[in-house]
């Protein structure tokens, strides 16, 4: 008997018919002798609908009350799926995040899981039931409902799998695995049989929408076997595993990109110790995450130009804060740009292969694409370019590194 945690996203439970299809799949797993915990998202479009209702009342909804509102989306799904399972002859019981006691911190809309009490879930599994848990939500120490941010159901599923010491966590979604890049941008993209946790972590952080970054962090930290599968068909999906399990390291495993980028620049900042903190400290205090950072020194003027990127949703608030900071510092000007995107190469093989960066830069140059910012780590290279060049850049790089399978050096075993 195996203990399996299955997670189904919004499109997988987007209608009554699809919920019944999920129930049939879950029942098959249970009938094979497995214990099954199911974690679900809200039905597709429901979270956006609820956010829209909130913004009809407040442009910036009170975070605590927004969490109370958004958590109802998953509650609808768990009840309907439990009913569908019972109707199919499969005993089931639904739980909200609070009922499972998924304990989080108090950062509303972006809460992080601290602990999970798996006792009630374990008891139901031992009694032969399928347990259906609302993803994306938890409760803080004061009993306030919290949510984990967009894609948080993935994190819920992996955290529950870790708490239960599950044999595997299966993420069912509307794609049949992890691809070398988004097939909607590059039709020649290939599905990967395997990818390392480290690569998947980079892909998730750099814009890949297949898995949420925190779910990959959880899986890697607690060594939870993770598999991405399609809820609309059969297949083995993509196994996310450890580097030592990969027979041959690829130079590049995939190309990630993010359209949700915005760039902020402060011109003419006094070149003095502590200026980076004075600029970024208030941004961090507003719970805005900063990605790429560049600082240029102008020696003759004893000033510096400071540039960084944030998520496009955070741009208006970041710009407001930066205008105040710049006035305090006596900076010359603040510039903002939302017409940019980030394209990234990811691969553990970068550690042992030279020339990755030069090929990337020459490929983009040959297409007339100007690089605005560059960031590197041990297994990734990211560039910021104008938004209009996203598709062209991704396709050119996909071909240059043979990710369509045209060269053997870029395939995973």
Image: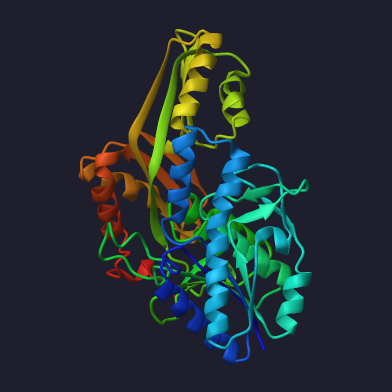
Q: Is residue 189 visible?
A: yes
Image position, residue 164 (x, y; %) = 72, 72
Q: Position of residue 59 (x, y in %)?
A: 47, 32
Q: Is residue 144 above or below residue 189?
A: above
- Residue 51 x, y percent position in the rendering: 47, 45
| Pick the front one: 72 or 329 | 72
Image location (x, y in percent) of residue 342: 38, 43
> Is residue 190 depicted above or below 254 in this figure?
below
Location of the N terminus by quadrant is: bottom right
Q: Residue furthest left?
A: 367
Residue at horizontal 55 percent and vertical 37 percent from the top: 289
Report the residue at 43% width, 50% height from top.
49
The residue depicted at 37 percent of the width and 68 percent of the height is 409
Residue, far bottom: 32
The answer to whether 231 is drawn above or below residue 160 in the figure is below
The answer to whether 30 appears left or right of 103 in the picture is left
The front one of 399 and 68 is 68
**Residue 158 left/right relative to 370:** right
- Colour mapping used in the image: rainbow
Q: Quadrant of the C terminus?
A: bottom left
Residue 216 seen anywhere in this rendered image of the structure: no
Q: Is 91 displayed left or right of 358 in the figure?
A: right
User: Residue 316 appears in which quarter of the rendering?
Assistant: top left
Q: Nearer the viewer, residue 386 or 158?
A: 158
Q: Judge whether 97 appears above or below 52 on screen.
A: below
Residue closer to the observer: 236 or 94: 94
Mark count: 0
The structure residue drawn at horizontal position 63% and vertical position 83%, both measured from the top left corner, is 91
């Amino acid at each position: 008997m195996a203990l399996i945690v299955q997670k189904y996203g919004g499109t997988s439970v987007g209608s009554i018919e699809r919920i019944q299809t999920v129930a049939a799949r879950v029942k098959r797993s249970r009938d094979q002798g497995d214990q099954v915990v199911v974690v679900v998202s809200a039905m597709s479009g429901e979270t956006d609908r609820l956010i829209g209702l909130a913004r009809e009342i407040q442009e910036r909804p009170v975070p605590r009350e927004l969490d109370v509102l958004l958590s109802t989306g998953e509650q609808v799904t768990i009840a309907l799926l439990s009913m569908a399972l019972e109707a199919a002859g499969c005993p089931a019981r639904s739980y909200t995040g609070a009922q499972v006691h998924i304990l989080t911190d108090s950062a509303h809309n972006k809460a992080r899981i601290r602990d999970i009490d798996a006792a009630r879930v374990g008891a139901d599994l031992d009694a032969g039931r399928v347990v259906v848990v609302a993803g994306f939500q938890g409760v803080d120490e004061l009993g306030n409902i919290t949510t984990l941010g967009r894609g948080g159901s993935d994190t819920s599923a992996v955290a529950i799998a870790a708490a239960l010491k599950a044999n595997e966590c299966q993420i069912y979604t509307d794609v049949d695995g992890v691809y070398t890049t988004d097939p909607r941008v590059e039709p020649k993209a290939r599905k990967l049989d395997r990818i390392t946790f480290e690569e998947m972590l980079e892909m998730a952080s750099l814009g890949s929408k297949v898995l949420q970054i925190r779910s990959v962090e959880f899986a890697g930290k607690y060594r939870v076997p993770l598999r991405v599968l399609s809820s609309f068909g059969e297949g083995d999906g993509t196994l996310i595993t450890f580097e030592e399990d990969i027979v041959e390291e690829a130079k590049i495993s995939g190309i990630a990109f993010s359209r949700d980028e915005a760039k902020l620049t402060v011109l003419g900042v006094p070149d003095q110790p502590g200026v980076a903190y004075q600029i970024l400290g208030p941004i961090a205090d507003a719970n805005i995450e900063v990605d790429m950072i560049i600082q240029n020194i102008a020696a003759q003027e004893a000033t510096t130009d400071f540039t960084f990127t944030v998520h496009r949703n955070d741009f208006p608030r970041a710009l407001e804060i930066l205008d105040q900071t710049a006035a305090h510092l006596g900076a010359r000007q603040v510039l903002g740009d939302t017409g940019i995107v980030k394209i990234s190469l990811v691969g553990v093989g970068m550690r042992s292969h030279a020339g990755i960066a030069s090929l990337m830069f020459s490929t983009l140059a040959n297409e007339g694409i100007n690089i605005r910012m560059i960031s590197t780590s041990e297994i990734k290279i990211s560039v910021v370019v104008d938004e209009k060049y996203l598709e062209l850049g991704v396709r050119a790089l996909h071909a240059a590194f043979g990710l369509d399978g045209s060269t053997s050096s870029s395939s995973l075993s």
